Image (cartoon, rainbow, N blue to C red):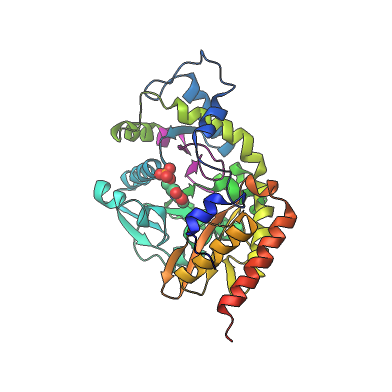
């Protein structure tokens, strides 16, 4: 077997199954192509370009107002700070694998002195019981839909309604980490506004399923948004002009928001193909959004060789990386986007046939 690094073989593949394509300058150019050259920049959070986009998003999310942020990290720390100030309680509850807990260098704790209470076991989503079992007062609870670090799993919509009702009755604010909110709507068979109605505040990202450059929207009632604008200024989030992010967010939102059903169906189809291969399983087995994780109960370096060989022999790129879980297991994440529909189906079938054969060849005991 010729040894090519996974990243290299993926780069050289003719077709890639996940995502919308390369994140390069073309993404920016395409978004700006049809924009009027006389359109004026926003200025420190004000102006037509930002205000109109904020109004559009507030209306789609069914909230009174919305504010555009350069990042979700900034938006969510601020949202939780506002809820803590309102309640006079510096505690928030969320999943142990929440973005705030594992990817933000403890911003919430270091900047705001807010303590996190971890709900649920890290391998599953938060259920009503976890909320009922909270033994200490919290200002707010954050729910992430879908729960990215466990393959994008979701609680049932009934559970969301019950948690929301409990929070309302008990004076707990409910915040939605909806980085991938649009991606879960086909599964729930709900509109964005119907899901957001269960939450006091909501964050949505523009560079995940939507495929924009960067940026986030935070939505809620007037008072909440007014305060979040003050915090955005304190954080340095009021760039003199955010229009490159806003225009691209708006462009790709319009281009892709209605395609989430397609991505979801592609994810189910692709997960089925992975699950049909020897020694491979997806988490969840049946995706509930456009994403899932692909797990191998084999050492990372050995799986890398197999995947690189599939890339090289079939021209189909499955992944550029693997993450080690322990010495004997590894995984990678898949988020379906525009690319999958352009890959000839017969080539996909050939790639998975080859993957299955190589997995058997390498890992079936003799
Ligand atoms: C679930 C979730 N929440 C929040 C964020 C933060 O978003 P940003 O990268 O815009 O700060 C991310 C980013 O990956 C995310 O996946």
Of 33 and 187, which appears nearest the observer? Answer: 33
Say if the magenta span includes residue 208.
yes
> Residue 293: x and y, percent?
54, 62
> Residue 106: x and y, percent?
29, 53
> Residue 117: x and y, percent?
35, 61
The magenta span reads 198-225
Residue positioned most to the front: 2
**Identity of the residue drawn at 47% across and 16% down:** 40
Q: In the figure, is residue 273 to the left or right of 148?
A: right
In this orientation, does residue 65 appear? yes
| Residue 95 location, quadrant | bottom left
**Identity of the residue drawn at 58% across and 65% down:** 284
Of 285 and 273, which appears nearest the observer? Answer: 273
| Residue 272 location, quadrant | bottom right
Q: Quadrant of the C terminus?
A: bottom right
Residue positioned most to the top: 38
Of 291 and 129, which appears nearest the observer? Answer: 291
> Residue 68: x and y, percent?
45, 33
Of 136 and 296, which appears nearest the observer? Answer: 296
Say if the magenta span includes residue 297.
no
In this orientation, does residue 169 appear? no
Q: In the figure, is residue 79 to the left or right of 343?
A: left
């Amino acid at each position: 077997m010729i040894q090519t690094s996974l990243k290299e073989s993926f780069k050289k593949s003719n077709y890639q199954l996940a995502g919308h394509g390369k994140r390069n300058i073309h993404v920016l150019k395409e978004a700006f192509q049809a924009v009027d050259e006389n359109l004026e920049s926003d200025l420190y959070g004000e102006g037509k370009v930002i205000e109109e986009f904020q109004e559009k998003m507030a209306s789609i999310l069914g909230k009174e107002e919305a504010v555009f942020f350069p990042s979700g990290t900034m938006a969510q720390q601020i949202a939780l700070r506002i809820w803590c100030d309102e309640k006079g309680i510096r505690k928030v509850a969320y999943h142990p694998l929440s973005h705030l807990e594992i990817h933000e260098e403890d911003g919430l704790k270091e900047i705001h002195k807010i303590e996190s209470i971890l709900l649920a076991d890290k391998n599953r989503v938060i259920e009503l019981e976890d909320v009922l079992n909270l033994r200490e007062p919290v200002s707010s609870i954050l729910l992430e839909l879908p729960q990215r670090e466990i393959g994008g799993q979701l609680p049932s919509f009934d559970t969301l309604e019950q948690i929301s009702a409990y929070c309302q009755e008990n004076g707990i604010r409910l915040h939605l980490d909806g980085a991938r909110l649009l991606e879960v709507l086909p599964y729930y068979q709900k509109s964005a506004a119907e899901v957001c109605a269960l939450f006091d505040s909501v964050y949505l990202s523009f560079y995940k399923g939507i495929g924009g450059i960067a940026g986030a929207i935070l939505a809620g009632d007037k008072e909440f948004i007014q305060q979040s604008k003050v915090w955005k200024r304190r954080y340095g989030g009021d760039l003199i002009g955010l229009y490159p992010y806003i225009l691209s967010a708006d462009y790709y939102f319009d281009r892709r928001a209605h395609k989430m059903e397609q991505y979801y169906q592609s994810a189910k189809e692709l997960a089925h193909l992975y699950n049909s291969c020897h020694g491979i399983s997806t988490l969840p087995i049946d995706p509930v959004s456009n994403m899932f994780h692909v797990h191998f109960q084999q050492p990372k370096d050995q799986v890398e060789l197999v995947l690189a060989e599939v890339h090289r022999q079939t021209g189909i790129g499955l992944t550029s990386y693997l993450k080690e879980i322990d010495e004997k297991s590894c995984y990678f994440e898949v988020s379906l986007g525009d690319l999958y529909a352009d890959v000839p189906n017969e080539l996909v079938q050939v790639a998975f046939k080859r993957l299955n054969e190589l997995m058997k060849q390498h890992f079936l005991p003799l």
